[in-house]
Image (cartoon, rainbow, N blue to C red):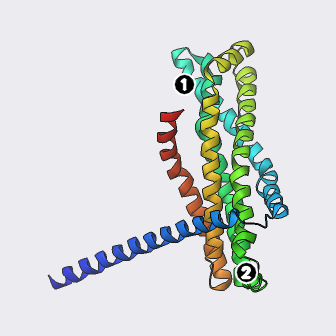
Amino acid sequence: MQLVTDNFIRFTEGIGKIVIKNISGLGLICRFILSFFYWAARPPYRMKLFFEQMHFIGNKSLFIITLAGSFTGMVMAYQTYFGFKLINVDSLVGPVVAISLAKELAPVLTGLIVAGRAGAAMAAQIGTMKVTEQVDALEVMGVNSMQYLAVPRILAGTLSVPMLSVFFLFIGNIGSYIVGTQALSIDEAIYLSKLSNFMFVSDLMQGVIKATVFGFIISIIGTYFGFSVTKGAEGVGKGTNLAVVWGMISVLVLDYFLTSFLVQIL
């Protein structure tokens, strides 16, 4: 009986430590976000660093976004066609694929891709600077590390992800159109007319809003874990891993809550 009691006590203590640790981490991230808004509003505005990060996050992600978007649209067209063929509404393949991409697939898949590519890079770059004491050197020179390293990356990520999402949507629809009209023999006029009848600006806006939030959260998480790095190279690897994992989890979890909210107002 005593052994069971001791095991139960250790179990509850372990759960308590995990809960306290996660709550503490959430509080630190909230303080990090407030610090970002404070330093983003103060001069100097480092536009060169901002555009460098826009190039890194946006331009250098175009190839993988093009690849993912085109094949996602193609696969969606195939899967939707064979499902709709059973009930003889295959002419609706175009609008269904377009709406799915606009509302859900484009922002979510773009967020996951950016989290895996740019979010990891943010954590690795800042983490490496942290363990090599370059961050401390900036502070000694009177340069706020938050303003110099985090603010340009977060702003660039917040603006780049929605643009990449719109590009993903465009490429995905091209892939869907090619497969639908060429491989599946859907009439081009019917495909386009149905698309214009069912696709609305509100659908596009819902995806853009989601992608903007995803870009902000991914950038916050990437830079936060970069500044949290300790213990040399091992810490950089751990921080990079946490940035990718929590970035992807945040995208998937926030997607549900954003969808529940946006369908009520748009």
Q: Which residue is mark 2?
A: 135
Residue 196 position within the rendered picture, expressed as x and y whole percent measured from the top left:
67, 19
Looking at the image, which residue is at 65% across and 41% down? 208
> Along the line of sight, which residue is nearer the eye, 114 or 1?
114
Q: Above or below — where is 108 with respect to 35?
A: above
Residue occupying the point 66% across, 72% down: 226
Residue 145 position, x and y percent, is 72, 75
Amino acid, disc 2:
Val
Q: Is residue 186 visible?
A: no
Residue 99 x/y as whole percent: 61, 30
Q: Is residue 215 above or below residue 16?
A: above
**What residue lies at 64% left-to-right and 48% top-to-bottom?**
212
Placement of 78 over or under 155, stated as above or below? above
Residue type beneath disc 1? Gly
Q: Secondary structure beneath disc 2?
A: helix
Pick the quarter of the image with the C terminus. top right
Total label count?
Answer: 2
